[in-house]
Amino acid sequence: MSDFKFTAPVIQELLDSELSERSPILSLQDKILAIRNSLRPGQQQMADWQSGPLAISAVPGAGKSTGMAAAAAIAIARQYERSSSRRHLVVVTFTRSAAANIKAKIRKDLKKLSLPQTGFFVYTLHGLALNIASRHPDLSGLQLENVTLITPTQSHRFIRTAVEQWIANNPGIYLRLLEGHQFDGEETERLRRQSVLRTEVLPELANTVIHEAKSSGISPEKLREWSKQTTDEYAILSVAAGLYEQYQNLMRSRDFIDYDDMILAALRVLKNDSARRIEQNQVFAVFEDEAQDSSPLQTQLLEILASDGDKGDNSSQTRLIASLLPTPVQTRLIASLNLVRVGDPNQAINSTFTPADPIYFRQFCEECDRIKRLATMDQAGRSTRIIIEAANFALKWINNQWLATTNNKQQTPDNRQVPFRLQTIRPVEAGDPQTNANPAPVGQGLELYTPRDIHHTVELLSQRVIELFGEDPTQTSAAILVRENRQGRWLAEALTFVCKEHNIILYDVGERDRRSHVPQEILALLQFCDRPHSPDYLKAALEALVQRQLIPTQDLNALASLPEEFLYPGPLAAPQPETVQKAARLCRSLLRARLELPLYQLISFLALTLNYDQAELATADKLAERVNQQIAGNSSMGGMLSALSEIVSSERFEPVETEDSEERYTRRGQLTIITMHKAKGLDWDYVFLPFLHENLIPGRFWVPPQSQFLGDFTLSEVARAQIRAALHGESTIPDVTQAWEQAKHLKISEEYRLLYVAMTRAKRLVWMSAAQKAPFTWSKPDNLQEQAPCPVFPALKRQFPECVANLAVMTKQA
């Protein structure tokens, strides 16, 4: 070493240069810089994060997941540099498919950095909670081998049982509900109202309030306390508290948990000082994607995990944790959180059927803005410029209309109640790293049609599809976005012939991507295996096999009418045709498997027999695990059939999403029919938005005729609005009339955000139409009547007159 000190300066410079080329630290810095420079300014702000809180409010098409993956890889690299500890980064997103997508992107960026593809974990929020709870079963109270996870719905047996028990325990209050606004005591009407209350009104109220309250950490006792602040004649929150309490008691008595219980269990762990430090010391930061869809409890979990367990004494940690508990909106202690939250409050489209509310992410953005830790990703390269202009116009127009009608154009102080955050999409700058950013439009890029009726809509849409796919189908991706599945089914039938004639692949997501069919098919085959001589069960099994194209289509009634003769024909029986023989052989193989395989393997075997694809097999595995858990104490065919029947009849079994789901929806050469909700996160070259009518967007709040005896409102929506008012820190809980109005505003806001999401899925063309005549309800599509367009549609026509289609000229040309 001493020789080096006296080496000539020139030689030392050469040596330093050679060492710098070899230095893994400098080499890593160069690679980090290369990834950073490949990002847009907003994405770079995320990549520059090193510690503390950071809120990123991003516009559609800004590249949130790409920026987050790059920022995550760079954060992991810096952690490698500065620490030898084994702390890791936790990345949280909303769905399994999104988690798989971002995990793949982080690994790709780590590979660019020549680093091991480790140092991070990607979870869904519930997956993270279950992971924490399962490591500390004594603190979480979850003994996973003894509990069963359920998805509560309005028709779930626990909800139904809770309703019946509440009625039995509260006959006076129930009688008051039965009387409603007016009641003459007529027996037939009394029986009708009883049925409505027991099967519709009270189950819906229970389901809504359980989701809203549990996801916010609110107990039945708290609901009763809030109920004392209201004066409505039915004491709706008190009724809801009773239903909630009965449900919780049933869950505990049967060792069942729901998804909110996972979050609550993880929070019980984190309330323990020792366990909290253990969990925090394994994590150097938390990154959250789609933050606008988080509930209060989920946000609380991430914020506690993101606080540094090594810093500060117990008292400061306690103050921090206390500030993060679910309370009305307030200034909280967030400066010490190593938390990056990325989201777009203008794409919050789940708040009317989940407890998510964009107000919470808006609040986080405001808190970060106060300490100069808010960044905006407002440059988007997805769409052509006119689509961006149309989306920006729609956002501003809707907000202005909202303020004009609700507040006499006086801006609300915190701007939280308007449908949109005032955030404009900007095209990217010259030299943007994204290839073909802000592509050239096809035609005008925005096309606005007013067809005569829905049949004329199909004609115009078909004509445009044929033109677009005629140029080069292999380079074309297109989708029709509908508001509800019934529209999609009608369109699929109307377009099938046209697409076949022009060799266009038509993919109806609503019809073909329902993997909730897995429980029904498995149940049909198991019931046949249990009672093979039942004509009904045999026919149901054969129908499932025909549906899966495992046996030819044939007269199933003839086969099922004589099960013994079909399955085991005697020597005197007439020879069976080959199609019948094939079906009989397959059915006999199922019966043989029933005798030879252990019970717990039957569902997996049937899934393979049905020739399920990867996603369906994963769903079947999930189903098998669920059923085997439920029958652990009663492992029998009867127990399995009972558990499966309950799943099929009482709840929507969530299928497993696989990593290729987005690719299946956006394949080139394919016209995809998909709902606006499911289209979020996807994009296509051409997007068609038909049937833009006021009765669906923003829609109208209405009370079902059968429950109008209670009044001009629904109990569930009033309760939801009252709970959210209390959570948002409003000075008083609104009465029924005010709560019903607030519920309307919540729905209208979300419907407009849904339209905004739909418009911003398009890259080169967005085609929009509002027919003059359309069904009032799509359950009766032939019942056409005059329908007003969605209010923003005429405004778009006035703003972009050059984009309005001249149907008279088009008709003459045709």
Image: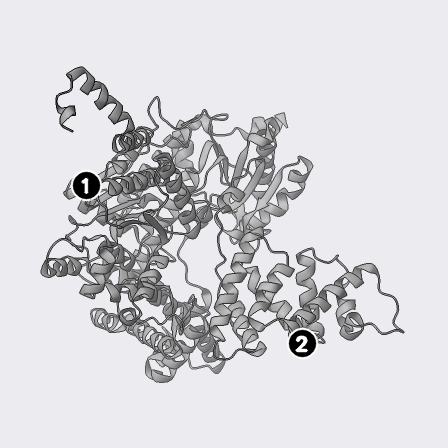
Residue depicted at x 24% and y 22%: 17
Query: Image check: 139 left or right of 592?
Result: left
Q: Residues within 10 Å of mark 1 (few under 14, many from 20)?
A: some
In terms of depth relative to the viewer, which is nearer, 191 or 475? 475
In terms of depth relative to the viewer, which is nearer, 222 or 282? 282
Q: Amino acid at mark 2?
A: Arg
**Residue position for label 1:** 373
**Residue position for label 2:** 531
The tag earlier along the polypeptide, 2 or 1, is 1
Residue 771 in view in this figure: no
Image quarter hosting the N terminus: top left
In terms of depth relative to the viewer, which is nearer, 785 or 440? 440
Residue 8's tag is: none
Q: Position of residue 734 (x, y in %)?
A: 24, 62
Residue depicted at x 53% and y 53%: 615
Q: Position of residue 194 (x, y in %)?
A: 44, 78
Q: Amino acid at mark 1?
A: Arg
Compared to 805, does 332 lie above or below?
A: below
Q: Secondary structure at mark 1?
A: loop
Pointers 2 and 1 in contact (C-beta within 8 Å): no
Q: Residues within 10 Å of mark 2 (few under 14, many from 20)?
A: some
Residue 139 in view in this figure: yes
Write down the quadrant of residue 451 in the picture.
top right
Q: Secondary structure at mark 2?
A: loop
Residue depicted at x 13% and y 24%: 5
Query: Image check: 611 left or right of 402?
Result: right
Q: Position of residue 106 (x, y in %)?
A: 37, 41
